[in-house]
Image (spheres, coloured by chain):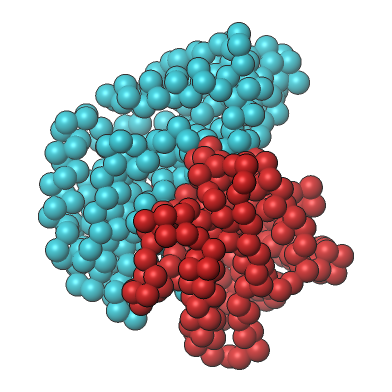
Chain colours: A red, B cyan
Amino acid sequence: MRHINVIGIGAGDPDHLTLQAVKAFARTEVFLLLDKNEQRQELVELRLRMIEEHARPGHRVVQIPDAERDRTTPAYREAVDDWRRRRSELVESLITEHVGPDGTGALLVWGDPCLYDSITAVLDEILAQGRTEFSYDVVPGVSSVSVLAARHRTTLNRVGRPVRITTGRRLAAEGFPPGAEDAVVMLDGRGAFAGIDPEGVHIHYGAYLGTPDEILVSGPLADKAEEIARLRQEARDAKGWIMDTYLLRRTEG
Amino acid sequence: MRHINVIGIGAGDPDHLTLQAVKAFARTEVFLLLDKNEQRQELVELRLRMIEEHARPGHRVVQIPDAERDRTTPAYREAVDDWRRRRSELVESLITEHVGPDGTGALLVWGDPCLYDSITAVLDEILAQGRTEFSYDVVPGVSSVSVLAARHRTTLNRVGRPVRITTGRRLAAEGFPPGAEDAVVMLDGRGAFAGIDPEGVHIHYGAYLGTPDEILVSGPLADKAEEIARLRQEARDAKGWIMDTYLLRRTEG
């Protein structure tokens, strides 16, 4: 039976790869790479270098542009559903065209596939439609959230307390009211941290985590919001893209 | 300067180690191991096998019993504070007695040091007291939460939605009311999932994740709570300990 390895490849440092991921690379005959249509050439090259280093001789690499999501519509959920449908068609054709009936393919995911990634849902959707058969498994990876905490030498949660993992969109819509749980914010293209009441809030911010371009800033949000907004804008202008995340923590209570 | 590597070693599969962790093992002169005073001999041996496989020739291993937390008192926070103080003294003496002034020691953490682990707080407390000098860094690891999602081939969050990482104690105290966010529950010694209203809740449960004894159960909580409670009791009776975690997700909405 055709098999697909979904492999978490870590947040940007090639040494984030687990031994399990390395072994999955070595079992893979064909790597199916979806490229975001953005200026992330560095990431594309980094991924290719990982494959070069860990894949078996004779492996193949197929690279195609990923489906694009409509970011102009306010209908977020619908845009995501439509995008996922097109992605599902794309991934299905990749599998049927490039992975033989007894072959092994791999899909690589930055960070950990369990956080804000849709590839397992896409594969389940393809299987549910019943046209293409395959088995798949998921190799967990080091998420940017873990790297954020590690680089700041802190924990996501305080003793016995919960932490919320959420999106920039939600933070912007809901704010961060007093009494709110500590929150890790991902997928924040617009810098929602600058729009909340900073009183009594500490931020641990990280961009390009685990890479030579890593940016780390930590401190009271009231003091740091402007600096972070400036740094991220400068970095985005210089590199053409940014990947960042942050932890918001109430300093009292 | 004396240096300490805090290394996340994954959830129980030796292949969860990252290449970064393997390199940190190889740089370490002395491994400082704190043993929980429980019947986790398997975990102790697994850790020693990882060291044997990845450490440099001539490395040393120091093993001492970890400080115990008073689990009988209702004063949770105070018990944790007291425990952390005693741990801090213990870790400080380990460092001063076994890591030379220019030496490199390592503290190993199951899973990822960023979730419900106090070792970075302990090290910060030692540094703040100013008697012992050292630098330290944290190598992120694959958490049991990531492995739970990977083994169930699901994500922690639904599209664009938040997820809450919390404790069994909190779940038992607060319940899981309609409208509550999807939640990952850790440190649940008493099976709090069995005490909440199961209506409309799906559970993804995992114990001994990534090990040969792994238990996975998934389904509507109303159908599965009893089975999970029985399986975990049987497993705990048989092995003397259990490490488990689960994801609660509302099926509607």
| Residue A121 seen by the camera | no
> In the image, is B100 to the left or to the right of B180?
right
Q: Residue at x 80, y 52 (%)?
A: A213
> In the image, is A146 to the left or to the right of A36?
left
**The N terminus of chain A lies in quadrant:** bottom left
Q: Position of residue B58 (x, y in %)?
A: 60, 8
Q: Residue at x 46, y 45 (%)?
A: B143
Pick the front one: A107 or B59? A107
Q: Position of residue B237 (x, y in %)?
A: 15, 33
Q: Position of residue B47 (x, y in %)?
A: 44, 24
> In the image, is B32 to the left or to the right of A53?
left
Q: Position of residue A172 (x, y in %)?
A: 60, 78
Q: Residue at x 43, y 15 (%)?
A: B64
> In the image, is B109 to the left or to the right of B106?
left
- The part of the image, by quadrant, that contains residue B133 is top right
Image vertical order of residue A46 relative to residue B221, above or below: above
Numbered circles on residues, count: 0
Image vertical order of residue A237 relative to residue B92, above or below: below
Image vertical order of residue A111 relative to residue A230, above or below: above
Image vertical order of residue A214 relative to residue A115, above or below: above
Pick the front one: B89 or B25? B25
Q: Residue at x 22, y 46 (%)?
A: B190
| Residue A72 seen by the camera | yes
Considering every residue shown, the one lying at the far top of the view is B58
